[in-house]
Image: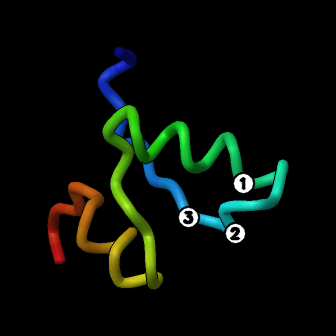
Amino acid sequence: EQGREVFAIPGQVDREQSRGGHQLLRDGATLVESAGDVIAGLPISGL
């Protein structure tokens, strides 16, 4: 909605602390499994 890329790191499915990240993933956030996923998902120019 804000025009920003959203990334989420999944957690254990039985942990209360993982609910927010899992909801973001269901809502379309980009899955992060490594730092490379974040770098690949950012619009970095001039490199």
Q: Which residue is mark 1?
A: 18
Neighbor class of circle 2 (other Cα within 10 Å; few <14, some 14-19, many 20+) is: few
Q: Label 1 near label 3: C-beta < 8 Å? A: no
Neighbor class of circle 3 (other Cα within 10 Å; few <14, some 14-19, many 20+) is: some
Tell me what residue is drawn at x 84 percent, y 49 percent: 16
Separation (CA) of disc 2 from disc 3: 10 Å
Q: Label 2 near label 1: C-beta < 8 Å? A: yes
Choose between 25 and 32: the one closer to the eye: 25
Label 3 sits on what residue type?
Ile
Residue 25 % position (x, y): 43, 47
Classify the position of the C terminus by image quarter: bottom left
In the picture provided, is 22 more to the left or to the right than 31? right
Tell me what residue is drawn at x 66 percent, y 67 percent: 11
Residue 12 is marked as 2
Q: Which residue is mark 3?
A: 9
Residue 2 % position (x, y): 38, 18
Quadrant of the image occupied by residue 13: bottom right
In the picture provided, is 47 more to the left or to the right than 37? left
Separation (CA) of disc 3 from disc 1: 9 Å
In the picture provided, is 13 more to the left or to the right than 26? right
Tell me what residue is drawn at x 29 percent, y 59 percent: 42
- Relative vertical location of residue 16 with respect to residue 45 in this rendering, above or below: above
Label 1 sits on what residue type?
Ser
